[in-house]
Image (cartoon, rainbow, N blue to C red):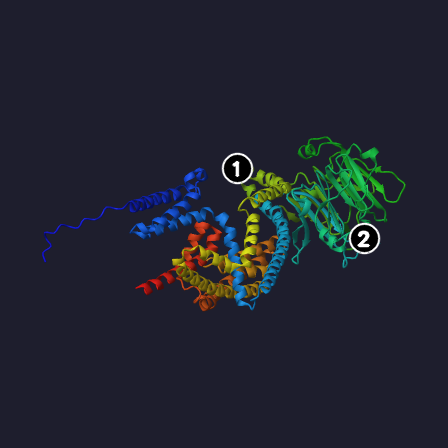
Amino acid sequence: MNTQNEPNPQKSAPSGATILAIISVVFAAVWIAFAYYKGNSTDSSRIMLLNPVVPILLIVLLTRVYRWIDIRSIVILEIVMISAWLFMRLLGVLMPFILGFGFAYFFRFIWNALPLKKQYQRGIATVVILLVCGGVLLYTGRQVSKQASQMGVGLLKFYYETLLPYAVGETFTTVTISVNPSTVEGEVPNQRMEEDPPSETFYLSTSNGIYEIRRNPEGKPARIGITNGAIFGKRVQALAASENVIYAGTPNGLYRYYRVPPAGDAETPGQRANATQIWQKVPGTPFDTRSIQAINILQWDETQIYVGTQNGLYASNDAGETWQSVAPTIYSDRSIVSIISVTGTNGDRVTYVASTRQIDAEIVSEQMNALPITAAVHWHLEGSSLEWEELPSIKRIVYALAGVNETIGDTNGTSQTSNIELYASTPDGLYQLNSFHGDWEKTERVPAISGTPATPLLVSGPSGLYIGNSAAIWHRATPTAKWQPFTTYKAGIGDAYQDQPIVEQAKSYLTERIPTIAQTVGEAVKEGFQFAGSIAFGFGGLVATAALTLIVFVYANQSFDNYFRSFLALVPEGHRDTTKAYMREIDNNLQDFLKGLVTVIAIVSIISAVAYSIIGVPFALVIGLLAGVCNAIPTFGPFIGGGFAYIAMLMGLAAGDFAWTDFLIRCAFVLGTILGIQAIDNSFISPKIMSDAVDVDPLLIMFAVMVGAAVLGFWGVLLAIPIIVVIKSVIAVTNSRTKLEQ
C-alpha cells in the first residue's frame, strides 16, 4: 500500500487544560528559584510571595494539573522541592509535632517489644518511663550544675594563678608565717630542740593570687594556690595566719579563709565543711570599706586579732565577731604599717605596732624614698595595766616589723639567743633594735642580697628570717648566716616586650578589664537568664517546644493508630491501598531500624560507662549513656560522644579533681577507649546487628548526614537515617508495584 502521497497527520492543538498545566509548572519553577534564592535572607518575611500560604496553594495546583501534562516527573520534582522549602520554613512550628509523634512511635515500639497490650498497662509503663527519665535528668542536672560551679571556680583559679603570671608576670605584695601552736605551747622561743622544731607554713600573696608554700621532698619551696571565693580580683596588702585561719587585708575590707571549720560553729557540719577553704569577707566590721594595711593574729591566742587601716587600729577578742578601736588617742589619725606579736625570752607577750602620720597609701608606695616620714613603733605588754609605750623612732619609713626567732652560735658550737629585739625593713635596708642599748641600727648583712634598693617584705619564723621585695624573697636561719634565695617571681611573656604599646594594652585588659567582668558576673548571669528566658518563651523556643511536644506526645500516645487511620481516610479511595502499602513498608523498616539502634546503643553505653568508670572520668555513667546515644549518629557520633568525655575531664580538671599529669594520662586513656569502642562497634556490633536494619551504602549515609546538618542543623543530623529509611521504603514499594503492573 502506497502511503507516500498521504499527507502527514496533524498534531491536535493543546487544550486549555494543558496550557494551564504548562503555565502552572513554569510559574512553580520560577517561584522555586526565587524562594531558594531569597528564602533565607533577613527580609524574606516581608515578601508576600514567600508566605507559607503560597507554597501550599502551589502544591494543591500542581497536584490538580498532574494529569494534564506528559512530563509528570517534573511536576513531582517541583512538589518535592516546594514541600522541602515549606518544611524548612515551618520547622519551628512542625518540630513539636514531629517530636511528639516520634516519641509516641518509639513508645509504640517499646510496647510491641514488651508484653504490654492493654491500655492501662501502656499508660502505667509510660508514666514510669517518664518519671525515671525525669529523675535521671534532674539528678544529672544537679550534679552537672554542681560540677559546673566547681569548674567556674577552677577556671578562675587557673586564670589568676596560671594564666596571668604566665602572660603579664607577677609581683610579691606581702608574706606571713603561721606556726603550729601545739609545738611551741609552754616553750620559750629559741630554746626548742633541734630534733623537734615547730612546724610552720609560709604564705605569699602576689599581684594575682594567694599561695601556701611548703618545701617538697627535695627541700625546694613549692606553691599551692589558695585563691578562690571573694578574694578573686582583690589586691592583697596584708596577710596573717594561724593554724586554722588566714586573714587577708585589701583596699576595701578584711577577708577570711578557714583552713579548718571553726569549733562550736552554729551551722551544721555539712555547712561548715562547705564554708571551709573559701575566702569570704568578714561582715560587720567598722573598717568594711577602708584599706587594710596590717593584720596580726596573736601567737598565743588565735581568737585575738589586730587590724591596722590607713587611719586607725582595731582589735577583736572573739575571732572577728566584734571589734573595738585600740588607743584612738594615738592611732585615730595615723596610718598603720605593720603589727607583730612576740613572746620574749623571759616569757613576756608583747605586741608591736609601726605607724606613720596619715598619708595616702599610693603616694607612700610611689614616693617612699623622697618623703621625710618618721615611723613610730609602739609596744604593749599583754596582761599589764601599762598603756601603749613608744620605742625609739626610726628616721625612715617602715615597711614591716619582724620578731626574733633566730639563734647564733658561740665558739663552743652551742646556740644562744640573740640580743636583737626587733627587725624593721626600710627603703634603704634592714634595721635591728638592740635590746641592750635600745636603739635602731642598720645591719650590714642586707647588701648581700644585691639589686634590691627597697625590701618591703619582712617576716620571721622558727626557720629564720625572710626578707624580700616585689621580685624575690631571701632567707637566713641565723644572724651570722648568709642570705639564701627562697623564692623568686614568675616573669611573664609581657615582661620581655613591656615597651610595646600593644603589650601594655593587653596587660591592662588582662589585669583590669577581665577582673572587672569577673566581679560583675552576677549581672552577666542575670542578663544571660533574661536573654535565655526571652528565647525560651518565644514561639519555637526551647521551653515552648518542650511543652508543645509533651502535649502532642500525650495525645498521640493515647491513640497513635487512630491518627493514622484518620490520615488514610483523607486519601482518595482509589489510592488507599497504595498508601497502606507504603506505610506498612515504612513501619516495618523503622521497627527493624529501632531494634538494631536500641541494641547498639545499649551495648555501646554499657561498654563506655564501664571503661570511663575504670579510667575515672567524672559522670562516667552519664557520659557512657551519652556516648551510646551519640553512637546512633552515623560517622560523627562516636567522636561527639568522645567529646563529652573530654568535656567531663576538663570539668574535673577545672574543679580540682586531679592534677595536670593525671589529667593528661587519663585523656590518653580516654582517646584509646574512644578508638577501641569505635573499632569494636565498626567490626563486630553494628555490622552484625544493623546489617538487616539499614541496608544502605555508608557513603550515602555520610552524605545524607552532612546535607541534613547543612539544611536543618542538629535536627537534620538526627533525622538523616530515618529519612533514608523512609525513602528506601518508598522506593522498594514503588519498584515492587511497578513489577506487578508489568
Question: Splitting the image into 4 quarters, where does residue 683 fall?
Answer: bottom left
Residue type, mark 1 in image: Ile
Q: Residue at x 42, y 63 (%)?
A: 585
Q: Can residue 557 be seen?
A: yes
Residue lying furthest front: 573
Q: Nearer the viewer, residue 322 or 70?
A: 70
Query: Is label 1 in a helix, a strand or a loop?
Result: helix
Q: Residue 228: image x %, image y %?
A: 67, 48
Q: Is residue 149 left or right of residue 113?
A: right
Label 2 belongs to which residue?
A: 264
Residue lying furthest right: 385
- Give the alpha-carbon distance from disc 2 to disc 1, as whole Å: 54 Å
Q: Residue at x 79, y 41 (%)?
A: 433
First in sequence, mark 2 or 1: give its number.
2
Q: Is residue 297 left or right of residue 126?
A: right
Q: Residue 44: image x %, image y %?
A: 44, 40
Taking 336 as reference, is 579 above or below it?
A: below
Quadrant, the C terminus: bottom left
Q: Nearer the viewer, residue 680 or 508?
A: 680
Label 1 belongs to which residue?
A: 502
Q: Badge 1, how many Cα within 10 Å: few under 14, some, many 20+?
A: few
Q: Residue 316: image x %, image y %?
A: 81, 43
Q: Residue 317: image x %, image y %?
A: 83, 45
Q: Is residue 602 left or right of residue 290?
A: left
Quadrant, the N terminus: bottom left
Q: Residue at x 89, y 43 (%)?
A: 384
Residue type, mark 2 in image: Gly
Taking 259 as reference, is 735 above or below it?
A: below
